[in-house]
Image (cartoon, helix red, strand yellow):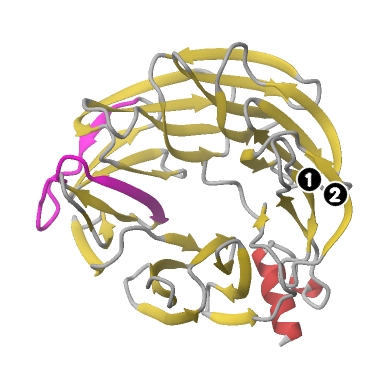
């Protein structure tokens, strides 16, 4: 079991299989009481044992991104601090403030040798391009719309929604390149706050899913096209929320909630195949999902009794169903899931197979935030 856990951890971290018998550590966050005390250190991803130097970030981390060679981490922390860390040596390379005036850093990403950051400011959104090794601001662009939280990364830029969920009006998509040029596309057919965003980085297309409708945005030209009605066409009710992920091969996954004045109902988890215009519901009870490698994971919390997790392949077939008795929520980081009760860890799960890698921890072991992949925001 120890060798299996080590091999899975190595796979989750993108390490060669030969290192599986001695898995490398991964950077993770330690939260301590009080404001401004987030600390970065190294963790064993299965045992959660900490080791090596520590880096004090000075503010709670809100977003992070790995450099293309996975040597450096760019970490945005509250409210507007950017810290560049040499992850091999756990050493700070650069610290800087992202933008003048008020605001909170919501997203950060590497784009080649530069770092792009998105700050939610009082008057809208600020996009900042930074030289991460000299702390020089190369370009700043202000957009007169709030950051909409749904974000996708490209190798050379960012794509994100603009607009708050409780606003009405057409959806807007910001497209940022490695030089910081920021273009905004208006998708009048879709409503802000009700759409899910998924991006095909190869064909450079963004897809906005609303109800059973899907609208395509060419990221090069900003041309918008209606993919046409899918089977069982239905408009999302006003107040609905959607999230989406690109799966490759012409498919995306969509889920969310449908709200009215009194309650909210799950919209289900659907696989949309753009090649033939079909939409298939694979879990009608889902209101959210996580992509972990080649599976989509849906969780259901059953009060204080426990948590269940069901995984589906991209074709819609159920891979496993797992009952995590005593856990009430789970963090998903790479291929691993950390089942927790309140703030404390109860089990480490291989999300690809549903296998339990470890289920006994010292009292007080907290659920970790490991920086395995780029953050979702």
Q: Nearer the viewer, residue 46 or 250?
A: 46
| Mark 2 lies on residue | 88
Asked whether the residues under the numbered discs 1 and 2 touch, taking CB atoms below 8 Å apart as contact, a structural biologist would say yes
**Tag on residue 293?**
none
Residue at point 71%, 46% (across, down): 33
Residue at point 42%, 81% (across, down): 320
The single residue placed furthest to the bottom in the displayed view is: 1
Q: Is residue 240 magenta?
A: yes
Q: Is residue 131 above or below residue 54?
A: above
At numbered mark 1, what does the secondary structure look like: helix, strand or loop? loop
From the viewer's perspective, tell me whether residue 173 is left or right of residue 266. Answer: right
Q: Is residue 190 magenta?
A: no
Residue at point 47%, 16% (across, down): 122
| Mark 1 lies on residue | 71
Label 1, residues with CA under 10 Å away: few <14, some 14-19, many ≥20: few
Give how far across and how far down residue 93 sits, in percent.
84, 32
From the viewer's perspective, tell me whether residue 46 is left or right of residue 339. Answer: right
Q: Nearer the viewer, residue 92 or 49?
A: 49
Label 2, residues with CA under 10 Å away: few <14, some 14-19, many ≥20: few
Q: CA distance from mark 1 to mark 2?
A: 6 Å
Which image quarter is the N terminus in? bottom right
User: Magenta part mainly helix, strand or loop?
Assistant: loop
Q: Quadrant of residue 341?
A: bottom right
Q: Is residue 54 above or below residue 337?
A: above
Residue at point 39%, 67% (across, down): 298
């Amino acid at each position: 079991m120890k060798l299996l856990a080590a091999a899975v951890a190595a796979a989750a971290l993108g390490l060669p299989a030969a290192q599986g018998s001695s898995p490398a550590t991964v950077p993770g966050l330690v939260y301590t009481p009080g404001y401004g005390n987030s600390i970065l250190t190294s963790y064993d991803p299965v045992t959660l044992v900490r080791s090596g130097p520590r880096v004090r970030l000075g503010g709670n981390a809100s977003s992070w991104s790995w450099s293309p060679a996975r040597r450096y981490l760019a970490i945005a922390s509250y409210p507007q601090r950017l810290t560049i860390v040499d992850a091999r040596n756990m050493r700070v390379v650069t610290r800087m403030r992202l933008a003048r005036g008020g605001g909170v850093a919501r997203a950060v990403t590497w784009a080649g040798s530069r770092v792009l950051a998105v700050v939610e400011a009082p008057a809208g959104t600020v996009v900042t391009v930074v030289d991460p090794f000299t702390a020089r601001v190369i370009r700043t662009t202000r957009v007169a719309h709030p950051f909409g939280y749904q974000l996708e990364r490209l190798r050379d830029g960012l794509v994100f929604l603009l607009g708050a969920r409780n606003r009405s009006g057409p959806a807007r998509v910001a497209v940022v390149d490695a030089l910081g040029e920021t273009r905004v596309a208006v998708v009048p057919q879709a409503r802000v706050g009700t759409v899910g965003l998924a991006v095909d980085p190869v064909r450079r297309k963004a897809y906005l899913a609303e109800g059973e409708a899907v609208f395509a945005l060419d990221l090069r030209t900003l041309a918008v096209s209606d993919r046409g009605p899918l089977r069982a066409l239905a408009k999302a009710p006003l107040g609905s929320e959607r999230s989406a992920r690109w799966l490759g091969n012409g498919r995306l996954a969509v889920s969310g909630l449908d709200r009215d004045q009194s309650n909210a109902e799950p919209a289900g988890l659907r696989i949309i195949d753009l090649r033939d215009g079909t939409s298939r519901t694979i879990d009608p009870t889902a209101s959210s999902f996580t992509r972990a490698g080649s599976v989509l994971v849906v969780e259901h919390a059953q009060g204080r009794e426990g948590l269940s997790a069901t995984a589906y392949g991209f074709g819609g077939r159920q891979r496993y169903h797992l009952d995590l008795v005593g856990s009430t929520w789970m963090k998903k980081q790479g291929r691993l899931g950390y089942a927790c009760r309140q703030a404390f860890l109860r089990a480490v799960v291989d999300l690809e197979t549903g296998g339990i890698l470890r289920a006994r921890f010292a009292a007080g072991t907290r659920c970790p935030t490991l920086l395995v992949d780029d953050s979702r925001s």
